Image (cartoon, grey):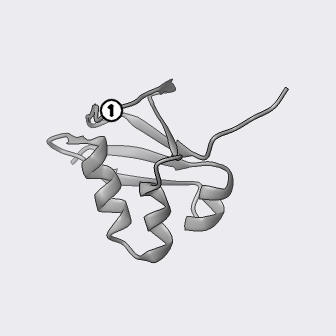
């Protein structure tokens, strides 16, 4: 069985009380499917589906609904600002 790594940063990490988790991913899934799977785990996980949450796939910012494959790393984080 192959896995994906899902990382959480900032306030999102605090909301779900996790920094990273491993999930099985034998046949691939889309970003929207991953978000729905996470959100189904309970109320604290529903923050994942908020429109302002950003996502990176293998350290590259992504938009839309890309395919996630075994071995990939997905990161979710709130918008960041700074100077």
Disc 1 marks which residue?
64
Number of on-image labels: 1
Residue plotted at (42% across, 45% down) = 5
| 55 horizontally vs 35: left or right | right
Is residue 6 found left or right of 68 in the rendered image?
A: right
Dot 1 falls on a residue whose secondary structure is loop
Q: How many other residues sit within 10 Å of disc 1, few (<14), some (14-19) or many (≥20)?
A: few
Residue 17 visible within the image: no
Residue at the far front in the pictured view:
51
Q: Residue at x 69, y 38 (%)?
A: 80
Above or below for 6 versus 39: above
Q: Nearer the viewer, residue 5 or 29?
A: 29
Residue 53 visible in the current orientation: yes
**Residue at 55% over, 66% down:** 16
In which quarter of the view is residue 43 placed?
bottom left
Q: Please, which residue is most extreme toward the left here?
A: 27
Question: Which quadrant holds residue 30?
Answer: top left
Residue 22 screen position, x and y as percent: 40, 53
């Amino acid at each position: 069985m192959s896995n994906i790594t899902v990382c959480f940063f900032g306030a999102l990490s605090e909301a779900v009380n996790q920094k990273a988790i491993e999930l099985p991913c034998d046949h691939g899934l889309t970003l929207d499917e991953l978000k729905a799977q996470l959100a189904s785990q309970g109320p604290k996980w529903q923050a994942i589906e908020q429109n302002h949450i950003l996502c990176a796939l293998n350290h590259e910012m992504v938009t839309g609904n890309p395919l996630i494959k075994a071995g990939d790393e997905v990161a979710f984080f709130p918008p960041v600002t700074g100077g």
